[in-house]
Image (cartoon, rainbow, N blue to C red):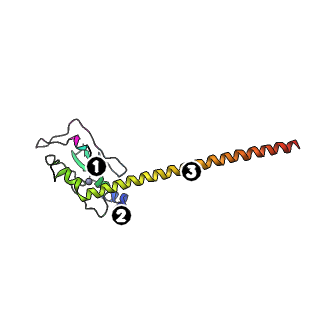
Amino acid sequence: MEETTDITAVSQNFENKSMPEDISKSCNDHPRQSKLSSYPSNFQNRSFQSSWFVNRNWLEYSVKNDRIYCFNCRHFRSYKTNIGDAFTTCGYNNWKRALESGSGLHKHEQSQAHVITTKNLESFKLRQQLQLSVINSLDNSRSILVRRNRDRLIKISSTLLLLAKQMIAF
Ligand SMILES: [Zn+2]
């Protein structure tokens, strides 16, 4: 839980102004996984593949600069985590090595920094759900109270009405 402190502040502090506009901007955003029918090929005739998004919720692709980024590491880094690699800074685009073991995507998702930020993201989501359920249960108990008070008021009003009628009768 220690790693999750000041996530919002960290996210704002680390937010790189040079990030392309077509990827997520904050931890409340969703990872942008733009699926195109084809992606630009580089000088080695290699390109990004949309199949790389499968089972990688963290992966973001910027159409604007044809590079990939890590959502988790960009928004959920803590002060203890290293500044990061291409996935958190300038964007990764070495398509030839992207799927090699010990390189590219695998290297990034197995890095300690990424494992920590993924845990941070999970606890952030958990806290959001918890807050939501607390708000819902508060709402529920408030509406029960309102209904109960309304019922009481109706009973009191009808008693008063009855008394008033009796008084009139006297
Ligand atoms: Zn990452």
Number of numbered discs overlaid on the protein picture: 3
Q: Check if mark 1's residue and mark 3's residue have beta carbons within 8 Å.
A: no
Q: SS for tag 1? A: loop
Badge 3 amino acid: Ser
Mark positioned earlier in the residue sequence (1 or 2): 2
Residue behind label 1 places its C-beta within 8 angstroms of ligand 1: yes
| Residue 86 visible in this rendered orientation of the protein | no
Badge 1 amino acid: Trp
| Image coordinates for residue 153, horizontal then vertical, percent | 70, 47
Badge 2 amino acid: Glu
Vertical order, 163 against 13 (above or below): above
Q: Going by the picture, which residue comes out furthest to the top? A: 37
Mark positioned earlier in the residue sequence (1 or 3): 1
Q: Residues within 10 Å of mark 2 (few under 14, many from 20)?
A: few
Marks 3/2: CA–CA distance: 33 Å
Q: Which residues are magenta?
A: 33-51
Q: SS for tag 2? A: helix
Mark positioned earlier in the residue sequence (3 or 2): 2
Which one is in front, 82 or 118? 118
Task: Verify whether residue 48 appears in magenta.
Answer: yes
Residue 2 numbered tag: 2
